[in-house]
Each structure stands twice: as C-alpha cells, then as structure tokens.
Image: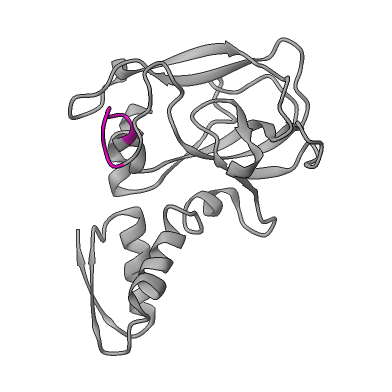
Amino acid sequence: LTNMIQTAPHCTAIWDIHPVAAMSPTVNEDVLEPGTRNKAWVLVRRPEGVISADCVRLEERPVDTDLEKDELLVRVEMLSVDAFIRTTLDQEGYHTGTPLNEVLPALGYGVVLKDGSGRRKPGTRVLGMLRAQTLSRVKSSQVSRVMPFVSPKHSLGLLGLTTGLTAWMGIFAVARKPRRGEVVVVSAAAGAVGSVAAQLAKRTGAKVIGIA
C-alpha cells in the first residue's frame, strides 16, 4: 500500500482488494453476514518525506449497520490510489489532512449492501470516496451509480473524476479546444491526468510538448 501511495504521482494505481485474503470481507455479493468485521488501513503516523510502512496500520473494526436515512453500507471491491492521497497525510496541505487513527482516503468502487433510505437496492454498484477499507459507511450524496457499460478500472482510471475527466475539462473547458497546428504544453505529462491530457490535445491535430 505504501509503495502504491509513493508512486501515485506518476500514475493512477488500481488496487483490486476483493481477492486479497488479508482485506477481503466475508460477505456474499450483496449480503452482510453476521459477525463480519471491517478491515481498514488507518493513518497512525504522519510521514516525513517518503511514506513508510510504519505510517499505516491494518485494523479490524466492528460494522455498524444502523444507518441514517442518507447513508449507505458498501462492500468495497476496488480502490484507486491517486496522487492526492499523499497530500492528505500531511497535517496541513492542499487537501484536507487526514486525522490520525482515521481510515486512509481513497476513491473506490463497490456494491451496496444496505441503504438507510431504501432507495438503492442491495447489489447496486457505486463509485465514490469509499476509503481504504473493506466495508464503507458513506453518505449517499458522496457516491454515484456506476454506468453499466463502463468497466470498474475505467471508472476509476481513464473515465475517473480525478484522471480522465480532469484532463478533458482542462483541455476543452478550462482552456479551449486546441486548433490544428497550435502548440500545447502539458506539464506533468507522465502522470495520470497529464498523459490523458496530452493524448486528447494530440487528437485535435495540435503539436503537443510534454514536460515529465
């Protein structure tokens, strides 16, 4: 996990936690079995420079299934380890700092086990800030339904909010659509967002210069 967080600025690492024995919850597709406990990676020490394994700890926690009407219980199947996670481990930074002994942030993909409002059926797949854990209790407004024609990895990667969609907005909305023959300079072009942005610009016929 710590190696993936460290390399995240250079790519979007997709972490499929479902088949991993140490992380996989003992639940069926959309049923929470009695006695199931949540396995979560928590921040126990703030890193100084390069993150190390002693900054995090894998803990088992009880699962509270008494949900508010605006909450969901989601079985996490896949996580995206993005560059922003590293900045959240600092006490102060661009992103809000993760408190000590709290679950590490991570965008994820999973299946609804229970909806406090009853609007989402068990088995519905959702995407959002599920955090690095096997079972996530999350506000229903913080997740969205996964489009059935998009694969899980693409939902978190190429078509993810923090990667492909960010690149598209940067090229076509924040700036403007490049014209054929124009020069587009992409900083951090080796990263998850920059690599997509460079390809989008190149498809318009522009000359693209990437700064790694």
Quadrant holding the N terminus: top left
- Residue occupying image coordinates x 47% and y 58%: 158
- Magenta stretch: residue 93 in it? yes
Q: Nearer the viewer, residue 94 or 110?
A: 94
Quadrant holding the C terminus: bottom left
Image-quadrant location for residue 115: top right
Image-quadrant location for residue 13: top left
> Residue 208: x, y in percent?
25, 76
Q: Residue furthest bottom?
A: 180
- Residue occupying image coordinates x 70% and y 55%: 148
Is residue 121 found left or right of 164 in the rendered image?
A: right
> Residue 175: x, y in percent?
33, 74
| Residue 22 shows in this picture | no
> Residue 97: x, y in percent?
34, 31
Q: Is residue 141 above or below residue 159?
A: above
Q: How many marks?
A: 0
- The main secondary structure of the magenta stretch is loop
- Magenta stretch: residue 89 in it? yes
- Residue occupying image coordinates x 53% and y 54%: 154
Residue numbers of the magenta segment? 88-94
Is residue 157 found left or right of 155 in the rendered image?
A: left
- Residue occupying image coordinates x 50% and y 32%: 131
> Residue 117: x, y in percent?
78, 35
